[in-house]
C-alpha cells in the first residue's frame, strides 16, 4: 500500500482556468477507500454537480473495484457526495448558476488523519487559443531550463 496518495486531474488545468479552490471531504464506502489507498482511482473526465437538495456530487470519478471486495464491492463510476460548509456550497451554487462557471475536481488525496479529501476548483472553460498559449508557455519553459542546464555545465 502506498503511503502518499495524491491522484491528480491533469487535464483540468489545461482545459480550464481555475478561479478558486476548495478542499472537500468525500463520502465513501468501505471498499472505495481501500481502492483509493491502493491508488486505483482516476479523476479524468469527472465534474461536480448540485442535486435538487443543494448537495454537491462528483460525477464520473472512477474508483476501481477492490480486488478482495467480494459481493459487497462498490460501483466504479457511482456519484459520490462532497462535504463542504453550507456557506461554501451557497457561494459555489450562486457562481455556477449566475456566471456559467463549472466545478472540477483537481486532485484526490488522503490527509494526515487518513481521510479522503478532494480539492475542487471553480473553473472557467478555456478557448482553443488559450490552450495554444498554455502549450507555448510550457515549451518555452522547457527550452529555457534546457539552455540553463547546458550553460551551467
Image (cartoon, grey):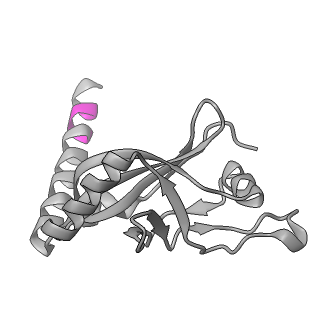
| Main secondary structure of the magenta stretch | helix
In this view of the protein, which residue sits in the foreground, 64 or 59?
Answer: 59
The C terminus lies in which quarter of the figure? top left
The N terminus lies in which quarter of the figure? top right
**Quadrant hosting residue 15:** bottom left
Q: Identify the residue at horizontal 56%, vertical 65% (top origin).
A: 80
**Quadrant hosting residue 2:** top right
Is residue 97 rendered to the left or right of residue 29?
left
Is residue 21 rendered to the left or right of residue 47?
left
Q: Identify the residue at horizontal 44%, vertical 63% (top origin).
A: 55
Farthest residue toward the top? Answer: 152
Q: Which residues are magenta?
A: 146-150
In this view of the protein, which residue sits in the foreground, 129 or 7?
Answer: 7
Is residue 32 rendered to the left or right of residue 20?
right
Q: Is residue 5 magenta?
A: no
Residue 24: image location, x then y, percent: 46, 47
Residue 11: image location, x then y, percent: 36, 64
Q: Is residue 111 above or below residue 8?
A: above
Residue 72: image location, x then y, percent: 84, 70
* Total number of numbered discs in the rendering: 0
Q: Is residue 112 above or below residue 16?
A: above
Farthest residue toward the front? Answer: 53
Q: Identify the residue at horizontal 38%, vertical 53% (top origin).
A: 120
In this view of the protein, which residue sits in the foreground, 113 or 82?
Answer: 82
Residue 27: image location, x then y, percent: 60, 56
Q: Identify the residue at horizontal 32%, vertical 62% (top origin).
A: 103
Amino acid at each position: 500500500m502506498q503511503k502518499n496518495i495524491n491522484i491528480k486531474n491533469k487535464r483540468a488545468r489545461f482545459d480550464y482556468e481555475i478561479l478558486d479552490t476548495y478542499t472537500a471531504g468525500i463520502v465513501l464506502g468501505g471498499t472505495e477507500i481501500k481502492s483509493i489507498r491502493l491508488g486505483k482511482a482516476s479523476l479524468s473526465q469527472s465534474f461536480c454537480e448540485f442535486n435538487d437538495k443543494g448537495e454537491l456530487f462528483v460525477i464520473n470519478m472512477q474508483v476501481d473495484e477492490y480486488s478482495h471486495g467480494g459481493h459487497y464491492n462498490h460501483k466504479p463510476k457511482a456519484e459520490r457526495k462532497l462535504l463542504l460548509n453550507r456557506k461554501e456550497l451557497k457561494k459555489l451554487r450562486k457562481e455556477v448558476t449566475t456566471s456559467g462557471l463549472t466545478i472540477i475536481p483537481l486532485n484526490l488525496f488522503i490527509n494526515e488523519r487518513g481521510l479522503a479529501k478532494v480539492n475542487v476548483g471553480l473553473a472557467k472553460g478555456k478557448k482553443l487559443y488559450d490552450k495554444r498559449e498554455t502549450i507555448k508557455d510550457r515549451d518555452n519553459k522547457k527550452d529555457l531550463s534546457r539552455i540553463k542546464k547546458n550553460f551551467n555545465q
